[in-house]
Amino acid sequence: MKFIFKSIQRSVSSQIHYNLVIILNLVFSIAVVFILLQNYYFLKEKHDEFFSWDHPATTYQLSLDTDYMIQYLSDGLNHTPMFYSGKEMIKELNNGKMKNYTFCLTAYVFGDIKGASGYDFSDNLDEDGYVPGLNLSPYAFDSLGLKLAEGRAFSQDDFENFDHNKAMSVILGNNYKKDFKIGDEIIFKNEEMTDKAVVIGFLEPNSVFGFFGSTSADNLLIFPCIYTDFPRSEQVDHEVAERMVYTDFANSSLYCDDPSIDVQKEINRLTAKYGFYMLSAEPIDGTAYSETKTISERNMFIMLVLAIITTITATVSIGGILYVKAVKDRPANCIYLSIGIPLWKINLAAAIEMFIYAGVAVCPSIGLSVREYGRLLIPAWQIAICALFIPAIGLLPLIFANRKCNLDLMIKEQT
Amino acid sequence: MSMIELKKINKTYKTGDTVTDVFTDFDLTIDEGSMTAIMGKSGSGKTTLLNIMAGIDYADSGEYIFDGTPVILKKTSDGVSFRRNRIGMIVQHFALINEYSSYENVEMGLWESGLSQAEQKKRTLEAMEQLGIADLRKKSPLLLSGGEKQRVAIARAIVGRPRILLADEPTGSLDSDTENEILNILKKLNQCGSTIVVVTHDQEVANICSRTITLEKH
C-alpha cells in the first residue's frame, strides 16, 4: 500500500501538466458520453412510454378542414339546419361503439378553496401554485382510462346540472382520500360569491391521464364539463351549452376499442348520412404510429453510436497521453523494479491514479445531470462503466510501455 | 561457502542474422563475504553477467545457484521477487528518484519488505547513519553532490539487508576524492560481512577487491 500511495503522490505532483490534460480530457469526454447516454435513456423512457402498444389504435383525433371551420362555427352560433343535423349525428355516434369526448386541464386559483371539514387546498398546490383541476366531457372518464378506487363516476345528471343552488359533483385524486370522504363538500369562495362541490368518488392510486398516460392524476380535482365558469356566477343557458358541445365536436377526441371498426369509414358514413362536413379521424396511438416509432428508434440508435464513437475517441486520446507519461516515467519504474517492486503493482498504482481522476471527472456530469433532470436517468452501474471504461482501456498502452521496463534499460538510460 | 555459483552458462545475443556468443560454458563462483571485481573491455559481457546474477537477464542454458538454491527464472516477475531482499543494486548514475527526498529514496528499499512502519523508519535511519547521510534525509537528490547521491543509493541498496550487493561502475561518474570515499564505504561494508560484486573499468576499484575476474571479448 505504501508504494501505491507514494507512487500516486509522486505521479500527481511531478507530472502536473499531463495529469491536467488527462483530467480535462476525462471531464469533457465523460460529460459528452454522459449527456448522450442521458439523452438516450430519456428518449428510451419516452419511447417505451409512447410506443408500448402492440394493438390497433383506440384513440383518434377528429378534425375539420380549416376551409369549413368558419361556416361550421357560424352554424353553431346561428343554429342553422347543419347545427341540428350535427347534433343528431353526434347523438348517433355516441350511441354506437365510438365515443366522442373532450377534456381540459384547469387551474383553480381564485379565492379560498377549502374542504368543509377544514382541509386547506393551499397546502397541496402544483408547481405553478395552482390547485390542479380537470374538466371532462361525458365519456371522457372511461376513454382516458381513469378508474375509481371508491364512489361513482359522473352520471348524465352531473353534466346537465346547471343549477347554481346545487353542489357540483367532483371526483378527487387518490392523494385526497386520506382527508376526504364521499359526500364531503368543497367550498370555493371569492369576494363575489361562494360555490360548492360534493365529493362523489376517488381515483385509484397512481392514476395517470392524457393520451400517453403521462400526467399524474393523484392531486387532481375532476369536474364534469358543463360549459360554465366555476364558481357558477349565473344560471347557464342550455342552448349555449348545446352550442358549445356542437362547436367542440369538430376538434374533439374519439375513443373506439373495437378493432373491427374502421373509424374513418364509420365517420364518413355518418357525415354522409347527415350531410355534414367531411371530418378526418387520425389515430394517435397504437401501431398506426409505427413510422414515428421507427424514427424514434433511429434517434436512439444515433445517440448510442455517438456515445460509442466519443468513448473510442476519448480512449485513444487518453491512451496516447498515458503512453507518453509511462515512457517519461520509465526510469522511475525501472528503479522500482530494481528494488523488488513487481510490475503489476506499478501498473496497479497507475490504474488507481487514473480511476481517481475518472471519479473526479465524472462528478461535474452527475451534478449537471441531477440539476437538469432532477434525478439520474442512467443506472449507477452504467455510470461506473462510463467513468471507468475510458481510463481502463486507455491504460493498455501504459501497461504495454511498462512491460519494457528493466534494469538493463535503466542502466543504459542513465549512463 | 559459495553465495553464487554459475555452471556452464551459455548466452548469445541475436541482432538480425548476426549471432554473438557472450558466454560459452562459463563458470563462476562468488564466495560469501567476498568482494569481487569484474573487469573487461566494452562488449565483453560484464553487464550481462551482472544482469544474470541479478535475475534481470537469463542464461540460454546452464545452472544458476544462489545461496545453495537453484534459481529458475521464467518471467520478469520471477526476477523481481528473486531480487527482493536478496540483491542490492548500485549503478553508476545512482538511480535516485528526484521527486522523493533522500530519506524516501532509501526507505523505498523496504516498501515491499512487509516490515512495520516503525521498523522501516528505524532501519532507514540506521542505514543513513551508517553512510553518514542522516542529516541529508529531507533533501531532494537534486540538491546533493555526486558522492552524496551515491551514498543515498548505497544506503537504499543495503537497507533491505540483501545477501549480496551488485554494483555496476559505482564510481564511474565521480571525481577521484569522492571515488575514494565510496570505495572506502564499499570496503567497510565488505569488512562488515557484505558480499559485493563490482563491475568496473577502473583498476583502482579492482585493487580494493579480494578477487578480480577479467572477461575476454569473444
Image (cartoon, coloured by chain):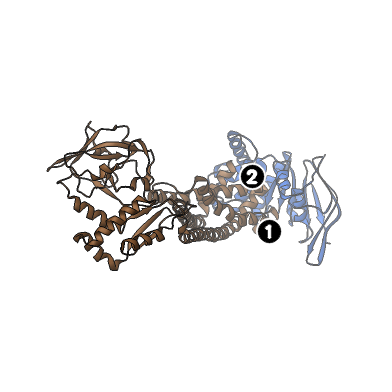
Residue A372 position, x and y percent, is 38, 51
Q: Which mark is residue B216?
A: none
Name the residue type under label 2.
Arg
The Cα–Cα distance between marks 1 and 2, rounded to whole angstroms, is: 20 Å
Disc 1 packing (10 Å; few <14; some 14–19; many ≥20): few
Which residue does the numbered mark 2 point to in the structure image?
B156
Task: Output the chain of dot 1.
Answer: A
Q: Nearer the viewer, residue A109 or B66?
A: A109
Residue A177, x across and y down, in percent: 32, 34
| Residue drawn where x is 59% and y is 40% of the image | A1
Q: Residue at x 38, y 42 (%)?
A: A207
- Can residue B174 be seen? no
Instruction: Report the side of A49 relative to A185 (left or right).
Output: right
User: Residue A188's spot in the image, x, y percent?
Assistant: 19, 40
Chain displayed in blue:
B
Instruction: Kindly identify the amino acid type of the residue bearing the numbered disc 1.
Output: Lys
Side (left or right) of A156 relative to A213: left
From the viewer's side, name the closer residue of B124 and A338. Answer: A338
Of B128 and B187, nearer the camera is: B128
* Quadrant in the picture for the C terminus of chain A: bottom right
Closer to the camera in the image, B32 or A257: A257
**Can the viewer see residue B141 in this picture?**
yes
Q: Which residue is mark 1?
A: A412
- The colour chain A appears in is brown
Horizontal side of residue B181 vs A172, given as left or right: right
SS at badge 1:
helix
Q: Element type at marker 2?
A: helix
